[in-house]
């Protein structure tokens, strides 16, 4: 089954459209030079840049040492939140900021416009926050589902109210 345009049948998943690579690179260059971007018309471009930024981190946002705990507790909200609270401070702060940002997008009014519900957001963001270190395709495949579920649980259950007002 393919993806749908926003006006298509609701039982077909929405398209997760990446930003034009040239526009993403141009935006990256502007941001790297501390220039305030102007003329952004395609929301997929900054979204792609955000994912790229997380993906290019030398160590993932959720460090490798925490990976097994994440995929072990992918269905347990209390345990998943406990993993987040045990992260190094900077990782915790950045992850909580990202989750708070994603929580805005899962509000029904925003989902109605973006067609990106919590499952879709978890699907596109999990690979940018967690990295399986196995070379075994079966392990990678199985863990991908758990990674998405872990991130979905955080979006749904992590209290990020302490991030209010943090720039």
Image (tube, rainbow, N blue to C red):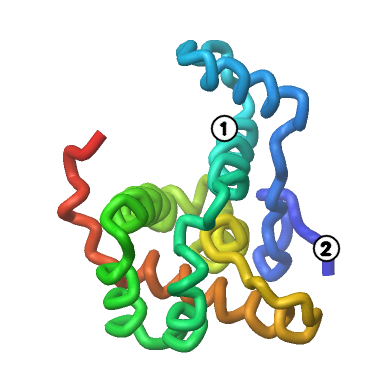
Q: Choose between 55 and 121: the one closer to the eye.
A: 55
Q: Which mark is residue 87?
A: none
The mark nearer the N terminus, 2 or 1, is 2
Res 46 → quadrant = top right
Q: Choose between 118 and 138: the one closer to the eye.
A: 138
Seen in the picture, residue 5 relative to 144 is either above or below; the reply is: above
Residue 157 in view here: yes
Looking at the rendering, in which quadrant would you find the N terminus? Answer: bottom right
Looking at the rendering, in which quadrant would you find the C terminus? Answer: top left
Residue in the image at 21% along x and 39% along y: 166
Q: Secondary structure at mark 1?
A: helix
Does residue 124 appear to the left or right of 35 in the view shown?
Answer: right
Residue in the image at 71% along x and 53% along y: 15
Residue designated by label 1? 46
Q: Position of residue 148 (x, y in %)?
A: 56, 72
As measured in the structure, the alpha-carbon distance from the residue carrying label 2 to the one carrying label 1 is: 24 Å
Does residue 59 appear to the left or right of 96 in the view shown?
Answer: right
Q: Choose between 92 and 149: the one closer to the eye.
A: 92
Residue designated by label 2? 2
């Amino acid at each position: 089954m393919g993806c749908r345009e926003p006006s298509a049948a609701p039982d077909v998943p929405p398209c997760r459209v990446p930003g034009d690579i040239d526009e993403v690179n141009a935006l990256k260059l502007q941001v790297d030079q501390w220039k305030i971007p102007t003329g952004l018309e395609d929301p997929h471009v900054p979204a792609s840049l955000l994912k790229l930024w997380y993906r290019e981190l030398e160590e993932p946002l959720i460090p490798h040492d925490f990976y097994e705990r994440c995929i072990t507790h992918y269905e347990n909200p209390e345990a998943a939140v406990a993993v987040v609270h045990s992260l190094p401070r900077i990782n915790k702060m950045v992850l909580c900021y990202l989750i708070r940002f994603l929580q805005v997008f899962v509000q029904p009014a925003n989902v109605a416009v973006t067609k990106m519900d919590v499952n879709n957001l978890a699907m596109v963001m999990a690979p940018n926050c967690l990295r399986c270190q196995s070379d075994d395709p079966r392990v990678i495949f199985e863990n991908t589902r758990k990674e998405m579920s872990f991130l979905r649980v955080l979006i749904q259950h992590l209290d990020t109210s302490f991030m209010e007002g943090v720039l």
